[in-house]
Image (cartoon, rainbow, N blue to C red):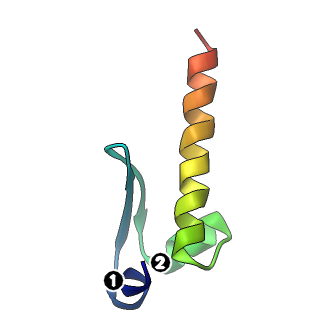
Amino acid sequence: MREAERLADRIVLIHKGKILADGSLEDLRHISSQTDLDDIFVYYINQYTDETELRANEF
């Protein structure tokens, strides 16, 4: 992930075939309130998991 932080203009985070986030590193940092790309990814994974669990509990 360090290479992506250094080289990429745009980052797309994908988990289980679903796009969780798409934007510049600065955009992703701002939205997640995280600075490290690994932590940003964990933030979005947690958002995805929480959202999935909420939907599962609706049934």
The x and y percentages for residue 40 are: 56, 67
Viewport quadrant of the C terminus: top right
Q: Earlier in the sequence, mark 1 or mark 2?
A: 1
- Which amino acid type corresponds to the residue marked 1 in the rendered image? Ala
Q: Is residue 24 above or below residue 57?
A: below
**Residue plotted at (61% across, 28% down):** 53
**Residue plotted at (65% across, 72% down):** 34
- Residue 8: image tag: 1
Q: Is residue 56 above or below residue 49?
A: above
Name the one closer to the observer, 26 or 36. 36
Extreme-right residue of the structure: 33
> Helix, strand or loop at disc 2?
helix
Label 2 Cα crowd, 10 Å radius (few <14 / some 14-19 / many 20+): many
Q: CA distance from mark 1 to mark 2?
A: 8 Å
- Residue 58: image tag: none
Q: Is residue 59 left or right of 14 when viewed as pictured? A: right
The x and y percentages for residue 4 are: 37, 81
> Helix, strand or loop at disc 1?
loop
The residue identified by callout 2 is 25
Are the two marked residues, 1 and 2, in contact with CB atoms closer than 8 angstroms?
yes
**Residue plotted at (58% across, 59% down):** 42
Viewport quadrant of the N terminus: bottom left
Extreme-top residue of the structure: 59
Rendered image quadrant of residue 33: bottom right
Q: Is residue 19 left or right of 30 when viewed as pictured? A: left
- Which amino acid type corresponds to the residue marked 2 in the rendered image? Leu
**Residue plotted at (41% across, 69% down):** 23
Label 1 Cα crowd, 10 Å radius (few <14 / some 14-19 / many 20+): few
The x and y percentages for residue 52 are: 54, 31
The x and y percentages for residue 56 are: 57, 19
Number of residue marks: 2
